[in-house]
């Protein structure tokens, strides 16, 4: 028969088993997390990193609720301090904070920029980078008051209609503000509105017919903002008005209204300096004036002929028709002077004295060799035709001789060949056919050959022929003259039929 168990021993065993169970449960609880993490490594850290990367991409660098990129990366780093990619993520947040601070400074949002800079500093961004942004923030903060004052002045100027033209007008003031803060919203919007007003003004001015003034306003708007939304419309409108003005000038020329035609062509040339139609129109006006000069000279209406020649020379002094008209008028004057040489001696001396007085007056004005017919040289030439041995005529001839030579040298240097020819004629008359005159003729002839060759290459046969004639009249034996003549003849031949 078994002995009964000792109750004390049984109780002790039960309490021991209970204690052992409690210890085992505590141990299991204690090791629960490491075991799970051993089974699913870095799951929670990776999730935090993914959430942080999305927050960074969305621009949520920091949030009070802990869902910003900074807070998520820091939480992941707390769970696993040894992860380098988490530290790289925090570095990216700091770099984004610095970039945001710079953008906020550009936009004039200085308080926001200060907070972004503070975030960058807390994330231990390089000191040089943070100090650079801090210095820029301080400079911008100091200039903010100036910017606001400039914008208020610009707004007032715009409201008063003072858009441009001086330093206190709207556009220059907005530009000054933007020079301090390039992305200031108020300054950008103000400048945009001022440019719209300027282009509206250009439209109104073009409606009145003042196309050069409208073009100046449009060019100013293009200079300030080439991409302004209203610019293409106004540019197109101005081009249409310019074409219309060109057509009006053509109509005026066809009706013989030369002054109005020239005004129209000049206006088109002022708006569009390279407009070939306007250039051709100006040449046609000059040719028409030259034709009138020849008709007046043929009737010995010298004053009218001189006026028309002056108008032609002011437009295109080197045009063939103008050169021919000038020569025709000169011959007419000499013919008239020859008729006056048959006057009685007293009347002839009086006429010579009048011409010398007129020449001296022109010399005092500085009109030594121009304008045609009213220059000191032209008056002296007629006096010489009437009485070449007069002492006063001889004295003035000596006085004007250096000016004629200097005129030739200057005109040749500027490639103004027609003017150079007129100066050379004057110099030859005053100097006589000396060696220096013959050398100058040869020099001018070579220049005409070069011009003719260039015009021939461009297909302008008519002007090439004129250049050949000018060169031949100056020096028939000039080097290259005959070769150029043969090239011109070949170019003038009709095309062969196959």
Image (tube, rainbow, N blue to C red):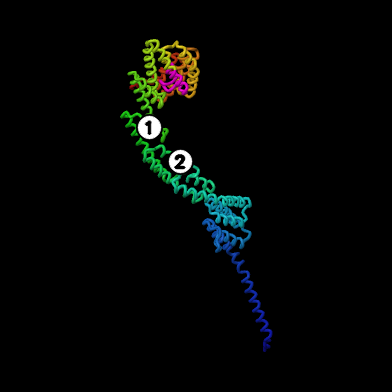
- Residue corresponding to mark 2: 220
Can residue 157 be spotted in the picture?
yes
Relative image position of residue 154 (x, y in whole percent):
48, 48
- Residue corresponding to mark 1: 263
- Looking at the rendering, in which quadrant would you find the N terminus? bottom right
Quadrant for residue 300, please give it.
top left
Q: Secondary structure at mark 2?
A: helix
Can residue 473 be spotted in the picture?
no
Relative image position of residue 262 (x, y in whole percent):
37, 30
Q: Is residue 143 above or below residue 272?
A: below
Q: Is residue 295 left or right of residue 18?
A: left
Disc 1: CA contacts within 10 A as few (<14), some (14-19) or many (>=20): some
Residue 422 vs residue 125, the one in the foreground: 422
Residue 425 vs residue 10, the one in the foreground: 425
Magenta residues (range): 357-380
| Membership of 368 in magenta stretch | yes
């Amino acid at each position: 028969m078994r002995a009964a168990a000792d109750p004390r021993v049984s109780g002790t065993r039960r309490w021991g088993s209970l204690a052992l169970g409690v210890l085992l449960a505590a141990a299991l609880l204690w090791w629960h997390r490491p075991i799970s993490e051993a089974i699913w490594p870095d799951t929670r850290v990776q999730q935090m990193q993914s959430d942080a990367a999305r927050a960074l991409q969305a621009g949520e660098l920091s949030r009070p609720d802990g869902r910003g990129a900074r807070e998520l990366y820091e939480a992941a780093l707390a769970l696993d301090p040894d992860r380098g990619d988490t530290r790289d993520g925090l570095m990216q947040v700091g770099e984004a904070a610095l970039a945001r601070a710079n953008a906020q400074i550009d936009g004039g949002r200085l308080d926001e920029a200060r907070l972004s800079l503070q975030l960058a500093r807390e994330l231990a961004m390089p000191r040089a980078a943070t100090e650079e942004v801090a210095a820029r923030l301080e400079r911008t903060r100091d200039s903010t008051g100036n910017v606001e004052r400039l914008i208020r002045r610009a707004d007032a100027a715009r409201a008063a209609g003072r858009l441009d033209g001086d330093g206190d007008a709207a556009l220059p003031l907005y530009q000054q503000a933007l020079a301090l803060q390039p992305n200031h919203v108020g300054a950008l919007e103000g400048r945009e509105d001022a440019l719209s007003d300027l282009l509206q003004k250009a439209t109104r001015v073009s409606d009145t017919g003042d196309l050069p003034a409208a073009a100046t306003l449009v060019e100013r708007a293009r200079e300030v903002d080439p991409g302004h939304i209203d610019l293409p419309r106004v540019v197109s409108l101005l081009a249409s008005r310019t074409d219309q003005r060109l057509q009006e000038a053509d109509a005026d020329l066809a009706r013989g209204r030369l002054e109005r035609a020239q005004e129209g062509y000049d206006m088109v040339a002022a708006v569009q300096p390279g407009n070939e139609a306007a250039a051709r129109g100006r040449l046609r006006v000059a040719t028409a004036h030259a034709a009138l000069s020849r008709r007046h000279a043929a009737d010995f209406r010298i004053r009218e002929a001189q006026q028309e020649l002056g108008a032609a020379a002011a437009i295109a002094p080197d045009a063939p028709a103008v050169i021919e008209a000038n020569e025709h008028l000169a011959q007419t004057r000499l013919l008239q002077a020859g008729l006056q040489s048959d006057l009685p001696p007293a009347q002839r001396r009086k006429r010579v004295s009048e011409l010398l007085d007129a020449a001296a007056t022109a010399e005092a004005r500085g009109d030594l060799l121009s304008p045609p017919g009213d220059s000191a040289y032209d008056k002296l030439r007629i006096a010489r035709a009437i009485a070449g041995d007069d002492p006063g005529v001889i004295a003035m001839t000596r006085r004007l001789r250096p000016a004629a030579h200097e005129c030739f040298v200057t005109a040749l240097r500027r490639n103004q060949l027609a003017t150079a020819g007129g100066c050379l004629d004057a110099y030859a008359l005053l100097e006589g056919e000396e060696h220096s005159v013959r050398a100058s003729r040869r020099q001018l002839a070579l220049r005409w050959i070069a011009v003719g060759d260039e015009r021939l290459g461009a297909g302008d046969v008519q002007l090439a022929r004129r250049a050949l004639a000018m060169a031949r009249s100056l020096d028939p034996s000039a080097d290259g003259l005959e070769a150029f003549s043969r090239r011109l003849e070949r170019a003038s031949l009709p095309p062969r039929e196959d």
